[in-house]
Amino acid sequence: MAILGIDLGTTNSLACVWKDGKPELVKNSLGELLTPSVVCLDKEGNLAVGAVAKEQLITDPEDTAASFKRWMGTPKTFTLGGRTFTPPELSALVLEKLRRDAEEALGEPVTEAVISVPAYFNDNQRSATKLAAQLAGLKADRIINEPSAAALAYRLVHGEGDACLIIFDFGGGTLDVSVVECFENVIEITAIAGDNRLGGNDVDEAIARYFCAFNELRPGSLNAEQQAILLRQAEQCKCALSWSNLAVMCLPGPDGSSYTLTLTRDLLFRLCEELFERMKRVLARAIRDSGRNIGEIDHVILVGGSSKLAVLPDFIASLFGKPPLILDDPDTIVARGVGVCAGIKERSGEIRDIVMTDVCPFTLGTSVVNDDKDQNPHMSVMIERNSVLPVSRTDRFYTTRDNQEKIRVDILQGEEYYARDNLKLGEVLITVPPEPAGKQWVKTTFTYDINGVLQVEVENPSTARKKTAYVVNPSLHLSEEELEQKLQELAAIRSQLDQSEEEQLLLATAERIFAESTGRLRKETGRLLDLYRAMLAEGGGPALRHRERKWMKSQLEKLEKYREGEVFDLELPDSWEDDGE
Ligand code: AMP
């Protein structure tokens, strides 16, 4: 049975399997490689996941969630269609869709997956990802860092010679920078740095903010729908600058007027300057931590959707003195790497030999006080960030008070000096015999394995008492019963994902164009929508519905073109007969 490699992206997700000695991307039910990581549950209880839901971001933003990957491992919830969802539940719906579509495409059941996450994801975020997989009916004990996956895919193509690479993974919501050493059949990630709040969305927001300032619009004066339209236009113009020198944004104003902005590459470069500064900091940290200097980097490889940002190569070239390497398809390289990883997991003969090492992306430690009066415990480092996995470190901690009966070992993650400023993952409490301060101690061992699972063992030698904790955030770890209940809840709403997805997408696209347009275009779109709804209501055989879909698609393409200023010529269908096509 195939293991599915999944690149669960902030904006889009992809699936890939290892087949005939190479990674092969799996198309979704719409025949596309990218499935938008978007979920919509409307007030009537209709569920949509993927491209259909993405259209509904505009027409029904209150009931649609996107970019929820940014909130994995946090308590944030989303309310859609009057029901509350956690980020793992929303991710589960996306994973479930990928799984079902892959089963359809491969013609066999899929129960196991390898999922990629940003290297900078902390323990909570990784656990949340595993929980999402579990909720989607997938066993996912292997979580791989996205840059490691990219390096794996790169190595498969450019397998020869020693090389020191930087994988610059710039996605919709995250930036991950990894330094990777390749030699013989070894791929070693030697340093990782990142910012999981910096991505293409921030570029869109910077453009949208400038648009408002330029047109003297207060951002607060726009309603949710207008804001969504503005951000979508900002994104479209940003992407258009990859092949065009300028792009125009236009938002309807009061009394038939409109607000506009002409975006050029120069302007985009200026708007990105603040983001470039943040990128520079991340790059500097990764290179410093790897022990290399900038001249020793052979290639900077751009991956992720936002690596197509028109002004990014110039920025990279200005820092490294040479242009970055842009591989064939930066959007799919991580997915292809996860496919390779799935192949390794399946123990496919061809690739079994590749050795991949990874590092722990953050520092792990415990809290200690200097003496009994110290009110501000600080972090005592057990595992330094960027230690190569698997890693295990042991240290001793002593009692600080006379007759102290218990020693508490906090499990902390983060880079801050004071314990309270780091993320607390858990604690181990152990009883010790009451004696003068500093007499009793515990031997504490932190072990972090290749799958990012942390084990903490605490032992008091005088009593031989021992306690072990595996760190999983309690709020993310469900009991069997809770898991069963959640699975049932999700199954109930999932069952609505039916065959007519393509038709739903056409309707949702038309609704979005309706919302985005004014005047004649709006009227024509309305007419088209009514007509197509009527056709669907009438039913008909599969061939007829196929023809209707083709017709509707061509009409929508015309409407989209019209918006770009071309002549509008809306055809009405002639007679519709089921010709058994
Ligand atoms: P990902 O999370 O890797 O799927 O990346 C999605 C991001 O890539 C979104 O923010 C898109 O706006 C961005 N993106 C896609 N194509 C382009 C392009 N041609 N230029 C700039 N950004 C792009």
Image (cartoon, rainbow, N blue to C red):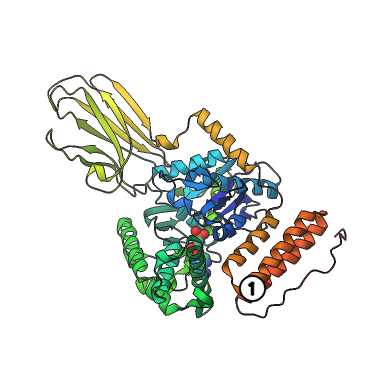
Q: Residues within 10 Å of mark 1 (few under 14, many from 20)?
A: some
Is 276 rendered above or below residue 148? below
**Nearer the observer, 317 or 480:** 480
Direction from residue 471 to residue 523 in the image, left or right = right
Whether ligand 1 has any atom under 8 Å from the Cβ at mark 1 is answered as no
| Residue displayed at 67% across by 66% down | 526
**Nearer the observer, 190 or 550:** 550
Direction from residue 17 to residue 117 in the image, left or right = left
Badge 1 marks a residue whose secondary structure is helix
Toward which corner of the image does residue 563 lie, by quadrant?
bottom right
Task: Please name the residue that numbered disc 1 is placed on.
Answer: 521
Which amino acid is tagged 1? Leu
Q: Quadrant for the C terminus, please.
A: bottom right
Position of residue 552 measured from the top left corner of the image (x, y, whole percent)? 72, 65
Position of residue 43 measured from the top left corner of the image (x, y, whole percent)? 58, 48
Is 162 rendered above or below residue 1? below
Toward which corner of the image does residue 298 lie, by quadrant?
bottom left
**Nearer the observer, 26 or 159:** 26
Q: Quadrant for the N terminus, please.
A: top right
| Residue displayed at 54% across by 77% down | 256
Residue projecting furthest to the front: 255
Q: Is residue 454 visible to us here?
A: yes
Toward which corner of the image does residue 335 lie, by quadrant?
bottom right
Position of residue 556 measured from the top left corner of the image (x, y, whole percent)? 68, 68
**Nearer the observer, 254 or 451:** 254
- Count the marks: how many? 1
Position of residue 358 measured from the top left corner of the image (x, y, whole percent)? 41, 48
Q: Is residue 164 visible to us here?
A: no
| Residue displayed at 42% across by 76% down | 215
